Image (tube, rainbow, N blue to C red):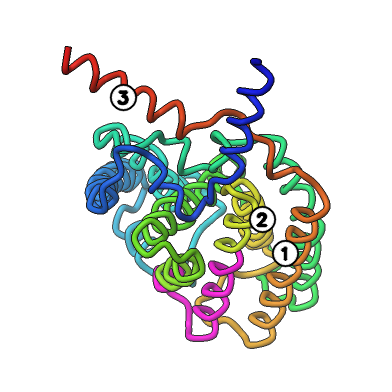
Amino acid sequence: MDYVVERSIKMKTNEHDFVTYGRRFSTYKWFKPIVVAILFIVFSLIFSSILTFLCGHAATDSTAFINQLNGGYDTMDVAHALSVISSEGAVATMIPALALAVFIVKDRPFSSYQSSRGGWNYRIFFIGLLISLIIVGIPNLILTFVMHDGTGINQFTIAGFIMLTLLGPMQCVAEEYVFRGLLMQTFGSWFRLPVLAVILQAAIFASMHPYNVIGVLEVFVFGLTFGLVAWMTKGIEIASAAHIINNMVAFYTSGFGIGAIKEDVAMKTCMFGIIIDVVIILVFFVIRKKTNLFEQVKRDDVAEFNQKMQARMERKRA
């Protein structure tokens, strides 16, 4: 009997679509994601402002430090600790900001922003890292060496390298929580059209990156790719892994003076990135079709949450 119940729950959970996942929870109301988003923005601004203020205060030349932060990608410093903390660290604070907003609104569990398989799956994440290293990391590294537009001078301090290694991946995961989690799932719950939700979040994602037109186009396709991958794999683990490999190659090569992070993106770089994006989609589409990797359910968040809410309502009535 237990086996039958467990199997029925698992089959039900497997049917959960990641993009429209928010509608599965009994407390869903169309306006609640807006409340979560507003609280998230407020908390994120507070956390990032405090971090930037502290780093600016600790900097030897505060004015130069602020000017460097305001200079965009052309003046981006990924080699020194304070600069990394105030840039990558500020973005990484979006994770606790979103968690706090979700905790206050209590419209659904925080784990539902990670996947519709019952939260974060580390096995899927590490598999994604390995595959992304091959299809994203190595090609990007080769392109960087071919273009050879770096200074040729290592800029890293030991503290800067450590901070980048710790905060760089967190920055990437934070963006996945916000764009492929909060935004995409909000649009999905409103319109019930996953493809439209994927496009909308990608457009907003691209608008948040201060590149030239070609660079914004590349980031838009980048956002589409990660949105489609999150939809296909029912979670943000693979998108996070590919995002991490892509960004960390750029960060490390910039810090070591091999490459450069620029606002003006060349067309050949854009086309190369789009080709990699297509490969990412195809590879994980095949993996989804040939394996049950993305059907491995840890728990049924929907059933657990809805039962908890039902029990709470019954206690209030008693």
Distance from Cα at disc 1 to Cα at disc 2: 8 Å
The nearer-to-camera label among 3 and 1 is: 3
Q: Which residue is mark 3?
A: 310
Give the crowd class for mark 2: few <14, some 14-19, many >=20 residues within 10 Å: many
Q: Which residue is mark 1?
A: 280
Report the front residue among 25 and 46.
Answer: 25
Instruction: Identify the residue shown where x is 38% and y is 56%.
Output: 189
Say which mark, if any, is on residue 292: none
Kind of element beneath mark 1: helix
Q: Which residue is mark 2?
A: 242
Give the crowd class for mark 1: few <14, some 14-19, many >=20 residues within 10 Å: many
First in sequence: mark 3 vs mark 1: 1
First in sequence: mark 1 vs mark 2: 2
Q: Is residue 26 magenta?
A: no
Spot the residue most to the front. Answer: 1
Kind of residue indicated by mark 1:
Ile
Pointer 1 with pointer 2, Cβ within 8 A = yes
Spot the residue most to the left. Answer: 317
The nearer-to-camera label among 3 and 2 is: 3
Residue 126 placement (x, y as % from top left) = 72, 40
Region in magenta: 205-225
Kind of element beneath mark 3: helix
